[in-house]
Amino acid sequence: MKYLHSIRVKLTAWYTLILGVTLFGFGLTSYFFTKENLLASLDYSLRNEVLWLKNFIEPQARKVKLKRQRPPQTAAKKPEKKVRRSHEVTVTEEDSTEFDQIWNQIYEHTLLSPKKQIIQIRDRNGDILYKSYSLGKEDIVFEDIPFNTTKLVTIYDAQGQPLRLAVTQNAFAKIYVAYPEAEISEVLGNLFYIFLILVPVALILSVLGGWFLANKSLKPVDKITRTARAITAQNLDQRIVTVDVDDEIGRLILTINEMIGRLQSSFDQIKQFSIDASHELRTPLTVMRGELELALRSKQTNEAYRQILASTLDEILRMSSIIENLLLLAKGDVGRSTIKFEPVALAPIIKELHEDGEMLAERKHITVKLEAVDDLAVSGDTVRLRQLVLNLLDNAIKYTPEHGTVSLSLVRENGSAKIVVQDNGIGIPREDQPKIFDRFYRVDKGRSREMGGSGLGLSIAQWITETHGGKIFVQSEVNKGSIFSVLLPLLHR
């Protein structure tokens, strides 16, 4: 039963079903179309034959009086007439060459006709003047004959076989032309038997061909399945062998390889994150452990104990900050962040953070400039937006040497609020710029720790920006400084 759920079986079954329905419809349509065309062609031929006989006899009859077969009692009183018979035609004739030629020409016309038509001509009294015996010797009897128009009907002969009959009459004769419908039925029967044989053969071939094509088409899928099953967290560097054909299978392989690449990148980030987080937490723990062990080994003065406790508190606060930032990012990853969106005026926040930046930069004698500040508003969380700009300011001040310059501005740009933080600090190498928003990533790890950074400030800034529907960019050049730009969608009032 499991095998019946295979895509190969389903594709083959659907292919066969569709082909079967198509062949059945085609056969049915062809049968009835052929039947209608054969009958229409027959009627057209019979009508033309009647018209030819009528047009041929009429002018001849005006010149020569067609001899009627008299009743037996009348014929007995008259001199016996000469009757000439052929193997195909019976002609009653008088000693008239012209009269004889009429039936001879009709006879020759009958011989030249490719169809086995029955031709019968009677005079106006119903006596037979001409008759073809090519398909039997019984007479054609039909009384409802129109005058100067052709009527087409189906009658039956003595054996019960249908005949298609065309009849007409004029002032001189009644003309009958018939053709056996059995020949048309035979053609249609042959066509039916051809379809009866070919359709099952075609269906059998379609099953075999469909199975072969489905198997050949899905064979790469089996290979993909086996390879994908063999890939685990320990060998994410393995990839499915690609094909050179740009089809659905080829695109599927590329998509799966891209997915595996993203998984590998995610696993690498998790591993690196675990290593960096462990290192970040281990450093303050090591400092605290060393200082506490030193305090326990020997008796210290009250002032020394106070210094040890103060140092321990600083490390605890540093650890708490790291853990709080990690918790914030983790909640954002799983969509559990507590951000309340409301209209927020950015200008007051920028001006207030400019003052905070001046205090942060005072120790390094860095000038913090406030450039243009437009009156703009966005929908967002005031606390998180303050944290976003403060992180960028703090980062700029940390990596700007003494007596440097940091500028802050807020302007409108293409329907967005653009916040720009620029410095003339050490800058960021081009190869490191795509990674600076990764968690715990530092361009210069040693110097960053000396400056007190945890490597999470820019990650949080990016998360806050994206949560507010914005984008963050960086432009930087080594030893010339960096420009961080944040675009946030404006609030439409």
Image (cartoon, rainbow, N blue to C red):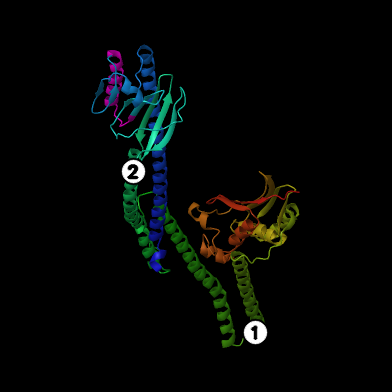
Q: Where does label 1 land, which residue?
A: 301
Q: Residues within 10 Å of mark 1 (few under 14, many from 20)?
A: few
Q: Residues within 10 Å of mark 2 (few under 14, many from 20)?
A: some
Question: Considering depth in this image, is 305 or 371 the residue closer to the camera?
Answer: 371
Give the x, y percent position of residue 268.
Answer: 47, 65
Q: Secondary structure at mark 1?
A: loop
Q: How many numbered marks does the figure carry?
A: 2
Give the x, y percent position of residue 484.
Answer: 60, 52
Q: CA distance from mark 2 to mark 1?
A: 117 Å
First in sequence, mark 2 or 1: give its number.
2
Residue 436 in view: yes
- Location of residue 476 with respect to 285 vertically, above or below: above
- Location of residue 412 with respect to 51 vertically, above or below: below
Give the x, y percent position of residue 121.
Answer: 36, 25
Residue 362 in view: no
Q: Amino acid at mark 1?
A: Thr
Question: Considering depth in this image, is 88 or 154 the residue closer to the camera?
Answer: 88
Question: Considering depth in this image, is 248 or 257 the residue closer to the camera?
Answer: 248
Give the residues in magenta. Answer: 96-118
Give the x, y percent position of residue 391.
Answer: 64, 60
- Location of residue 291 with respect to 58 vertically, above or below: below
Q: Amino acid at mark 2?
A: Leu
Q: Does the stretch in magenta take in 363?
A: no
Question: Considering depth in this image, is 169 or 35 the residue closer to the camera?
Answer: 169
Q: Where does label 2 land, which residue?
A: 191
Q: Are marks 2 and 1 in contact (CB under 8 Å)?
A: no
Q: Quadrant of residue 316?
A: bottom right
Q: Main secondary structure of the magenta part?
A: helix
